[in-house]
Structures are given as structure tokens and as C-alpha cells.
Image (tube, coloured by chain):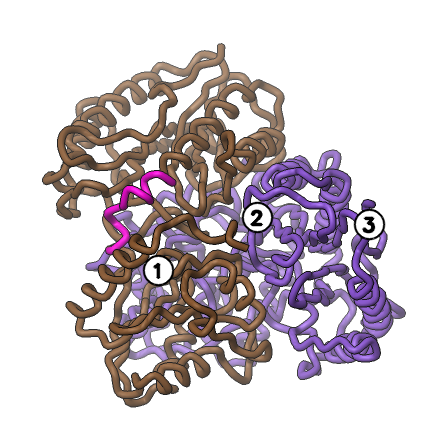
Chain colours: A purple, B brown
Amino acid sequence: MDSFRAPFSASEYARRLEAARAAMALAGLDALVVTDPSNIAWLTGYDGWSFYTHQAVILDHAEDPIWWGRMQDTNGARRTVWMGADRILGYADHFVQSTTCHPMQELARHLVERGFATGRVGVEKENYYYSAKAHEVLGVSLPDARLADATALVNRCRAVKSDEELGLMRKAAAISDHVIRTAIEAAVPGLRKNALVAEIYSAMITGVGEDWGDYPAIVPMLPSGPDAAAPHLTWNGDRLKAGEGTFFEISGAYRRYHAPLCRTVFLGRPPQDMLDAHAALLEGLEAGLDVARAGNRACDIANALGRALEKAGIERSARCGYPIGLSYPPDWGERTISLRTSDDTILEPGMSFHFMPGLWVDDWGIETTESLVIREDGPPEVLGTVPRQLFVKD
Amino acid sequence: MDSFRAPFSASEYARRLEAARAAMALAGLDALVVTDPSNIAWLTGYDGWSFYTHQAVILDHAEDPIWWGRMQDTNGARRTVWMGADRILGYADHFVQSTTCHPMQELARHLVERGFATGRVGVEKENYYYSAKAHEVLGVSLPDARLADATALVNRCRAVKSDEELGLMRKAAAISDHVIRTAIEAAVPGLRKNALVAEIYSAMITGVGEDWGDYPAIVPMLPSGPDAAAPHLTWNGDRLKAGEGTFFEISGAYRRYHAPLCRTVFLGRPPQDMLDAHAALLEGLEAGLDVARAGNRACDIANALGRALEKAGIERSARCGYPIGLSYPPDWGERTISLRTSDDTILEPGMSFHFMPGLWVDDWGIETTESLVIREDGPPEVLGTVPRQLFVKD
């Protein structure tokens, strides 16, 4: 059974609870309803593909967290959370996707039983797994409680990684390296995109040595040629062509921890404008990495990148990165800090980012990126080891 | 470019618009804001892994739908939707995961510009991609509009599949068959679970002949032994053991269409209670399939299954199936009809279901399931061709 349990120490979970409770206290919350699967896993260890039905963790200031979800998933909770079986609650199956009742009625009942009927209860209003309807039903079912927006309260606690977490991220990064090397090696004119994705998945899930690969929160993306101007197209059965570039946007995952990595391969001779843009991109990456230091701000990275790109006449408006770590679909970012000119968050040792300055122009796209960890001193730890270059297979 | 476009005729999209508009008229809606990625794809053809940022389709009674999303994803929209470029709207990147502004402010502006400031506007309140916050911001930004709950309005239009859709589902089913056969063949004692998943992904994405495999909306699940009591655990690096059963819960996907299929393999000699339960399960499956006919009700299938299981002394409370077709993570069901005793929806020709009577007991689990299509007359078309049995490898 224990092979499913997340490999963290009791003190690591204690640290997390303490951080979340401190943030709750600052926000004046008596209880917190956590619905983000990444936050649920971070607090309790829970792991399972059950987030398509309503589930939550109830956190208060005194007792162990409560895992709450569909009855059939309590078996998975018993195998993955660190709390005792008495802290696992299931709701009956007739609540699932019903039009006449809603699981949040059950959650409200548990909150009332635990003394929060008139409490100030935090909810994650901006989350894939907390729908407008869930909020409405919870509000109606707790007429005397005050529901407060606690979006990203736990996510922000996750920003600085512990050594235990960094250990898992380094394993994820080794898998990312393996996947990118496999993809660059396999890419030849005539190969179908889906056949290439099959090789990518095989490397990603096989993992590296004993370190088995988990599923990443986003599927591999690898658009080619003019389609690489569209960053989020997934693959099809088209064939790779000579004279086209393809970027690989992937992440290895180890025990739900991610370390994304992107590289671009060109089959043939890249056009001069792409070579020039990539040179500027590398300069911007180096400049951004150099200021990714404790005490600097998130925007310093974006500004350093921006200056290098501007010098080359490249305008780029999208953010150039986001925090990474534990995640579930549909996003491997933490949805807190953004590496952009308007974000002045101070960088702290242990924060981890995907520095992701993709360039998508009208008729091609390139992505060369790094996952990094802010150090106590000096420039960041770069998690990947794949050379930072445009890979040309002529 | 056109290789990314969904392979549907203009008349198929016209049929879909007509159905959605008829449902809107019944609900008294002037406009509909569609945020479910499956509904967006069904109406417009849009396909991309961009649903982790806010996006929507605006549908009214007169004009072509409008695709609205993040600016960098308009390039993907141009490649995948059937509407003209003038029906594609992007919002600036600073709205993405911002704490000071929200994309729904932009959507509200577009709705006002199109004359819906005082209209009755449908929203999908119970959806992963319509958060409590999104609803709040849209409401505040449209103070004179009436936001009405239109959850599952489009999903219900999707219940009866066209011949064009069934063509894609049959291709997905052929991929499911290929994956299940690959998994059963590969499963041997000592094999690591993740190595087996690597083979599963490889088969799933390689596809069958020209028909390339898309990513399924749920990752493969294959719990073993006592862990198979927990239906939604994902894999780890443990080794398959002699004397244990493993079920495979997978779906091939073709152009986002699914046809899930589950089979169970036992390495060694299954215990008598598992054999008995599986015999009852098969009887229940046959009985359920026999009543899966146009004019009967969803609950008739659940009742037929229930009678066979009860006869064998098996109590099973979870629903035993759901509609399937086009889907995006985190769920491959359509979230409308449920095959359970309380659902009296009349079955219609062209409806498609995953008839999914998994059994999860204390120390093992078995899943033998079928995807089916209701016919005009007689029993349903069963999409899979893998023998309906417990696979024993002694």
C-alpha cells in the first residue's frame, strides 16, 4: 500500500500545515476549503485522477486536515494521505453529476458539524475545480457563514520549495532531459507527429533508472513550421518536413512534480530571421538567468529578457514564465507569480520557475527554456542539462 | 493548415448550431457563453490545450459563433475553427492569471458591444472551466444582464451522435481494442507498472493504420491487487505480481472522440470469489446490453445489471455508465445522463454510452466494460471487439 504514499517526511507535512495556517490566520479564516488538486496533494498527499468529481480538503487551526470526496475514492485516499482513516469522508454516489442534488450540500453539512456554521470559511474562487455552481450551493447551504475568497492562499505557500521537494524536481528534470534528447534524436523528415509523440511518451513514462515517470499536467506539444506560431496546438498525424522547425514543449514528472523544458529542432537550414531571433533569445535567457537571484524581483527577469529581445527588434508581450512544482491537469504552473514586467514579487531562495520565453511569429515559433531554482546566493540552479541551443539537423 | 481542422462537414456544424439554438430558445436565452472545452470544440471545431486560461464561445441566434480567448491562442483558433477570422477575438496577456484584472471583464465588454447588456445570457455554472470567480466578475461587469444557468445545455445536444461523429468513435474504438490487446499481452509478473503504461501510451498514440491516436481525456489507469479497490489511483513503479489481478481502464481517442474500454487480467489463478463475481458481472453486462434499446430508459440498463449482481449477492451502489463522445480533460463523460436507477432518460438512436459496471471490493477490483451506440432497432452496436472475459495468464 505504502508505495502510493508521497515520499515526504512527517515534518515536511507539518511545515506545510503551519504555513497554510499562518496564511489562514492572516486572512482571518476559521476554516479553509481546498479544492485545487495540487493544494490537496500538497497538504495531504492525496493522489488520484478523481478531481473530475467534487472533492476537497477541510483545514482548520487545530485538527488534522479532512479529506472529503466521492465514496469510491475513499479507498484511494486511504492509500495516499498521511492522516488517519477517521479523517477521510465520502459522499454517496447519487450526488455525482446529479441535477437534483449537489456534493457541496454534503460538504456544508460537515462544516456545520465541525462548528463552522457561522465561521469565516475560505474558498478558492478562481480554480478549475471550484465551479460557479459549487460556490452557489455552498453559500446557500451555509447561510450564516462568511465565504471569503482564498484563491492562491495555499498556492503561495507552495512557492518556496523544501529540500525534499527539490529532490523530486531534480528527478523530474532528469526525465525532461531524457525526453528532449529522445525527441531531438528521433525527429527526421517523414516521421509522423503522433509516432514522435509515442516515443516521447514512452521516454517520459519509462523515466530514468529507478525513477519512474508520472503523467505531466499538460500533454506534450510539438507544433511544426507555420503551425508553431500557435503555441497550444496538440499533435496530429502529419509528417515532419525538411525545411521546418518543430519545438518540443514538455515536462517530465516525478511523483506529480514537474520541471518543464523546451527545445527547438530544425530539419534543414534555418532561415536567417529564425537564427537571428534565436541568438537574441539566448542572450535574453542568459540575461534573465543572471538576475534570477534572491532579493531581485520577478519583473527583473522579464525586463532583462525584454531588453535583449528589443535590441534585436523583437517585440514580445506575453509573460515569460511562472512558478512550477507539484501539479495536476490542466496546468503545470502554480498560478501565483508571473515573470512579467508588472510583477514585483521578491525572489526567495527555493522558489522555482519555468523561464519560458517562447517566440511565436507569423510563420514559425521557437522555444528554448529553462526550469530554475533560486539560490541563497548567486545565479539560479538550472535544472536541465540539455545544451541551450537551436538544434539543427541538416 | 487544414490538417488541424476537425473533419466535419459544414452541414454537421449547421446541425449543431441549430440544436443549440433551439435549446437556447426553449431556455429563453438571447446569448450563450460556452466555456466547456468539449462544447466549444463541438460548436466551432476549436482544438488546443489552452483551456487552462479563460476562453469561451459566444453564441447568439443570428450570427456565426465567436471564439474568444487569450491573444496567443487566436493563432490556434485560426487553424481549427470553421468560422472566419473576424469571428476570433483575443484578450491581452496581462489578463492571464492576474490578481488585478480578469479576462471576464473583456468578455463582458464584447457581450455589451453585441447588444447583450440587458439580455438573458446563459452560462455553464457547473463546469471545470467556469470558476466561481469568473461568474462573479461576469456578473459585476454585466450589471443589467440576467445570467441564467445553462449547465449541460450544449452537452445535452451532444447526446445523439451523427453518422460523422460515429465514424470517429469507431476509429477511437479500434484504437482502444489495440491498446487493451497490447496491455494484456505485455502484462507479466515482474514488469514495472510504468513500463506497461509506456507500452499503453505507445499503442494509444501510434493508433491503428492511418488513424493516429489523440490524447484521451483521462490517463490510463491500471491498479493491481488490493490497490484495484481504489478505482482512480494512477500508476507507479511497482512490479506486477503473480497472484494479482490488474484492470485496465483506458480509452483510445481519435480527433478528441473517445470509446473507453476496460478489461481485467489476472496473473495466476484467480480466487473463486473473483471468478464468481466476474461471471455475475458478465451476466449483468449481457442483460444490460440487451435492454440498451431505443425507447427504453437509462435506468433499465442499471436495473438489468443490478438484478444479475444481486442474484450473486453483490451490492453495487455506484452508477454504471455515462454518455461518451467528444471530450477534454479531466473527464471523458458528457456529464448529462447517468446509467443509474434514478435516471429515466429515454434512450434514442445514436446515443452512445460507456456501460461501466466496475466492481471494487476490499481486496481486489475488476472492470469489464463496453462502449455502445443505441440503434434504431434491436440491441446496441458494441464498439469494441475484445472478448468479454476475465483474462487469465496462469
Residue A370 shows which numbered tag?
none
Residue neighbourhood size for the residue with mark 3, other residues' Cα within 10 Å, grouped as few (<14), some (14–19), many (≥20): some
Secondary structure of the residue carrying numbered label 3: strand
**Labels 1 and 2 within one chain:** no
> On what subunit does the disc labeled 3 rest?
A
Residue A318 image offset from top left, x and y in percent: 65, 74
> On what subunit does the disc labeled 2 rest?
A
Residue A235 shows which numbered tag?
2
Q: Check disc 3 and give the amino acid type.
A: Val
**Labels 3 and 2 within one chain:** yes
Secondary structure of the residue carrying numbered label 1: helix
Residue neighbourhood size for the residue with mark 1, other residues' Cα within 10 Å, grouped as few (<14), some (14–19), many (≥20): many
Residue A341 position by quadrant: bottom right
Residue B13 position by quadrant: bottom left
Of residue B31 and residue A132, the one placed in the foreground of this image is: B31
Q: Check disc 2 and give the amino acid type.
A: Trp
Q: Name the residue furthest top.
A: B394
Q: Check disc 1 and give the amino acid type.
A: Leu
| Disc 1: which residue | B43
The span picked out in magenta is B157-168
| Disc 3: which residue | A392
